[in-house]
Amino acid sequence: MEIAEPYQKDIDFAFFVVNFGYSRSEYDALTPREIAFIRKAWESKMVADSYNMYNAAFTAYFNANRPKRRKALKLWSKKKVKKADMEVIRDNLKIIRDVEKTEGTGWVDAIYKANHLPPIRRS
């Protein structure tokens, strides 16, 4: 660690280039706080990816070697979807209709344009 200490800034820059494709100017624009948050997010992603890989390998091994008449494990469990609150949906639709009456539908075209999509034309 003592040998690498003078080169710590260069080591950090190399980490960002290899993992995120940052240029030198993009890296220099980051604050120490942003660097710490990016490193933590990257670490959390690596832990989640390795945990998912472990679960996939374990499930595949168990399913390949399970005893006869034993049900196979599922890799992903289905989440129960909560039903939408119709009152909230009605309120939101009322707000949207009011905005469309007063301001028009230009905001929809702006969203499509920002996402480089052709606007939908209703007849």
Image (cartoon, rainbow, N blue to C red):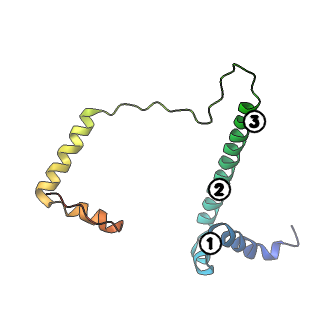
Q: Quadrant of the N terminus?
A: bottom right
Residue at the spot 74% in from the left edge and 26% down from the top edge: 66
Q: Residue furthest top?
A: 69
Question: In terms of image quadrants, where is residue 34?
Answer: bottom right
Residue placed under numbered mark 1 in the picture: 21
Say which element carries label 3: helix
Asked whether disc 1 touches disc 3, contact meaning CB atoms under 8 Å apart, the reply is no
Closer-to-camera residue (25/18)? 18
Residue with the mark numbered 3:
61
Q: Position of residue 56 (x, y in %)?
A: 68, 40
> Residue sitting at 70 percent across and 45 percent down?
53
Cα gap from disc 2 to disc 1, whole angstroms: 17 Å
Provide the secondary structure element on which disc 2 rests. helix
Q: Which residue is mark 2?
A: 40
Please identify, in this view, whether the residue under mark 3 or under mark 2 is nearer the observer: 3
Q: Identify the residue shown where x is 65% and y is 23%.
A: 71
Numbered circles on residues, count? 3
Q: Amino acid at mark 1?
A: Gly
Image quadrant containing the C terminus = bottom left
Query: Quadrant of the rendered structure where residue 76 is?
Result: top right
Residue type at the position of mark 3: Tyr
**Dot placed on the residue nearer the N-terminal end, 3 or 2:** 2
Q: Please give the label number shown on residue 88.
A: none
96 to the left or right of 14? left
Residue 39, picture quadrant: bottom right
Q: Callout 3 environment at 10 Å: few (<14), some (14 to 19), or many (20+)?
A: few
Cα gap from disc 3 to disc 2, whole angstroms: 32 Å
